[in-house]
Amino acid sequence: MKVLSILYTACLALLLSGCEEELNTRPEGTVPTIGIDYTKPENIFLSVSAAYASLRSYGAHVFPYIGAFEIASDNADKGSSAEDNPPMLEFDNLTYEADNGLINDLWKGYYDIVSSANYSIHQMPLFEAAMQNSANKLYARQCQGEAKTIRAYAYFNLTRLFGKVPVIDTLLTAEQLSAVSQSATPQLYAFIEKDLLEAIQVLPAKYSREWAGRINRYTAMALKAKVHMYQEEWDSVASLTDKIIASGNYELLADFREVFSIDGENSRESLFEIQSSTLGNTIGDQTFMEYAYVQGPRGNYPSNMQGWGFCTPSQNLIDFYTARGEVIRPATTLLYRGTKTPEGDSIRSGCVNPVYNGKVYTPSSYNIWNYNGYGFEHNVRILRYSDVLLMYAEAKVQGATYTTQSGLSADDALNLVRDRAGLEIMSGTTLQDIWDERRAELALEEDRFFDLIRTGNAASALADKGFTIGKHEVYPIPAAQRQLNPNLLQNIGY
C-alpha cells in the first residue's frame, strides 16, 4: 500500500518557519538564507524532501511530460476535444517549434529539480561536519546520494529532450546563469554517470516500510543502466541490471493490474515512483500532482471520475496488442468508454474520447479532493522491475560479455515478463522481440518516444507524423531560454 512518509516530511518542512525559505525551490542564482541548525539529525532529510517535492512540478511530470514523452510517439494521440490545446497537438503532429510553451515548461521544470537537488547536495557536507556520531554522518552522505540521483534523473531527461544543455551543479549569480554554455551529449552522460556512481557507493540497499518510495542503491543502478543503454554500453547495462536481479529485492507482481493500483504503489516491483497524495485531505496544501488527472476520462460523471482526457491510446497501439493476441495488458492499459471497471466505476458512453489511459485509473473511493480529485493519489511509475529485466535481455542479445550472477539468459528475462502477461514462452530472443515487449509492457508510461529514437526505429514508426531524421531526435531549445541566455545554440532544423 501507499506509504506517505516522504510527503508528510515535505509538509513538515514547509511548516517549519525557521526553515521555510530554505526548502522552497529557489532560483538557481540566489544565495541560501541562514537558519538551519546543522547539529540536529532531524533536519538532515528536509532539503532532500524538498528535492523530492520538486519532482511533482507541472512542467516536469504532468502535462508537458505526457506530450513530449508519449503523445509524440505512435502509442498515443492528443485526446481531449479537437480544438483543445494547440501546443499539445503540435507534439502529436511533430510540428512544434522553439516557441511552444510546453517545451519551455519542460526546460524550466527539470532545471527546477536540478536547483532543488543542487541545494540539498551542498547542504549535506555541512550536516556531516556538524554531526557527532558516525551513523548521522553516514545518513547525511546517504541523503546526498538521494539528491544526486534526483539530479542525475533530471539531467537524463534534459539530455534526451534537448541533446545539449548546460550543466549547472553549483550556485550561480544571475549574470553567470545568462552566460553558461551547453555541454555536448557525451559530457552530459559522463556527468550523470558520475552522480549515479557516487550515489550507488553510499545509498542503502533498502529502507524500512515506513520510508517506502525513497531512492535506494538499486534505484540508482537501474537509472544508470538506462543511461548506459542509451549509449549502447551493453556490458555496463548487463552488469547493473544483473546486480538488481541477483539481489532478490525485486520481483514482478503476479497481477499486472495491481502494478498500477493504489495498493500496488511502492511495491516489490517498483524501483522509482514519484509520490502523489492528498494525504487523506479534501482541502489544504497541494502534496499531489495532476499527472493522472490530465489523462482522466473527459466528460465522465460523477465529477471525481473525470479529467482532461489527454494522452489517449492510439489505434496503432490497440492494433499492436490485437495482433499479438494480448489480453491481460490491454485490459489494464485501455480504458474504454461505455464500460465498467472491475472496481465498479462507470466510464460513460458520453465521454469525449473512445478510450483512455487505464494505467492512471483511480477508483472513485480514492478521489476525495474538494474539486474533482481524479488520480491525485496516483504515483508516477518511473522505473519498474520489468524494465530492468528487459534492459538485461537487450544487453545479452546485443552481445554483453559480462559474467552474470543471476544466471538468467535473455530468453529467461524476456519470458518472465511475457509469462506475467499470459503469453507463450519464447526462445531465440531477438532485438525486435525485446523492443516489441518493451512497447507492450511499458505502453503509456512515457518510454516509447525515446525508445524509438535510441533504437533507430522512429523514422519508420512515425513516418505518418513526418518524423525527420536529423531533426526530431531532439526538441528545440526553447526560444524563451535563448532570450535569457544568448549563448544557447539552437538544435538543427528549428
Image (spheres, rainbow, N blue to C red):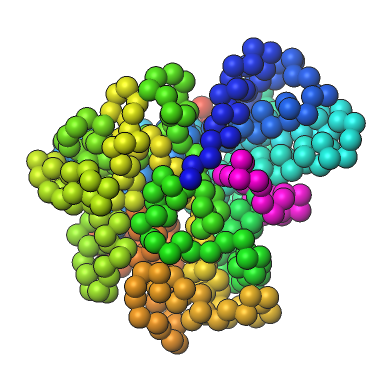
- Residue 192 on the magenta segment: yes
Q: Position of residue 381 (x, y in %)?
A: 46, 49
- Identified at 27% across, 74% down, the residue is 324
Q: Magenta stretch mostly in which secondary structure?
A: helix
10 shown above or below 188: above
117 shown above or below 72: above
Residue furthest to the left in view is 350
145 shown above or below 125: below
488 shown above or below 410: above
Quarter of the picture containing the C terminus is top left
What span is in magenta?
189-215
Residue furthest to the right in view is 132
Residue furthest to the top in view is 17
259 or 153, which is in the foreground? 259
Q: Position of residue 330 (x, y in %)?
A: 27, 61
Q: Is residue 455 left or right of residue 114?
A: left
Is residue 136 visible to the viewer in this orientation of the structure? yes
Q: Is residue 65 left or right of residue 293?
A: right
Q: Position of residue 56 (x, y in %)?
A: 48, 34
Q: Is residue 79 left or right of residue 206?
A: left
